[in-house]
Amino acid sequence: MRSNGSMLNKGRFECKRCGACCKGRDVPLALDDILRLSEFLGMDPDGFFSECCVEMAIDENTMALPFLKRYGEACQFLDDNICRVHFVKPSACEYMPSTIFGSLEHLRARMPSSCAIQHTKPESDERLRRIYMASMMITAIYYSKYGTFKFRLARPFIYRILLFKRSHEGIRKLFGNEIAQN
């Protein structure tokens, strides 16, 4: 029982659209996130990257990786606490709230008391953790080789991420008619 008298809900997390998880944090992007977001917004991947992303290192001991640009404290895609790219949101956002990024206590400490995470126990999903970590590792391998995003260079790496995610639709979009020819 929590201090406010409510029982911890072990069911599905239901977002209250407070926008708290979309504010005050940097959103890392995997290479397939860049492709998916650019397609949704009707932009070419390189144009999307130039306009909506920034490469930054978390500290001096890490390499720069792609992140969404923020406008002020909020994600650039947050409008009136509603995500404009909800159906194709980055993997880091898709898996929220999740303990794949840290402990439940850490997650709760970052969210306001009105957030549903305070009263819900998100399911721990080792499969999601593996998918997310593999996507980010492939992205890091790409960055260690090329140092910056260029779609033509990133395509084989995006393909590997999509294979890992078993995204047949994503692979067809990535390669189009080239698959039929091979």
Image (tube, rainbow, N blue to C red):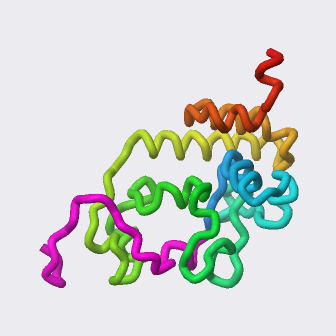
Residue at position x 87%, y 40% in the image: 152
Q: Magenta region, mostly helix, strand or loop? A: loop
Q: Point out residue 118 in the picture as x, y percentages from the top left corner.
A: 30, 74
66 over 153 or under it: above or below: below
Q: Point out residue 123 in the picture as x, y percentages from the top left corner.
A: 31, 53
Q: Looking at the rendering, in which quadrant would you find the N terminus?
A: bottom left
107 over 154 or under it: above or below: below
Decide if residue 78 is on the left or right side of residue 11.
Answer: right
| Res. 108 visible in picture | yes
Q: Looking at the rendering, in which quadrant would you find the C terminus?
A: top right
* Residue 22 lies within the magenta run: yes
134 over 121 or under it: above or below: above
Q: What stretch is highlighted in magenta?
A: 1-25
Residue at position x 67%, y 56% in the image: 62
* Residue 82 lies within the magenta run: no
Q: Point out residue 35 in the picture as x, y percentages from the top left corner.
A: 74, 48
Question: Which residue is more in the foreground, 113 or 81?
Answer: 81
- Residue 133 position by quadrant: top right
Q: Residue furthest top?
A: 182
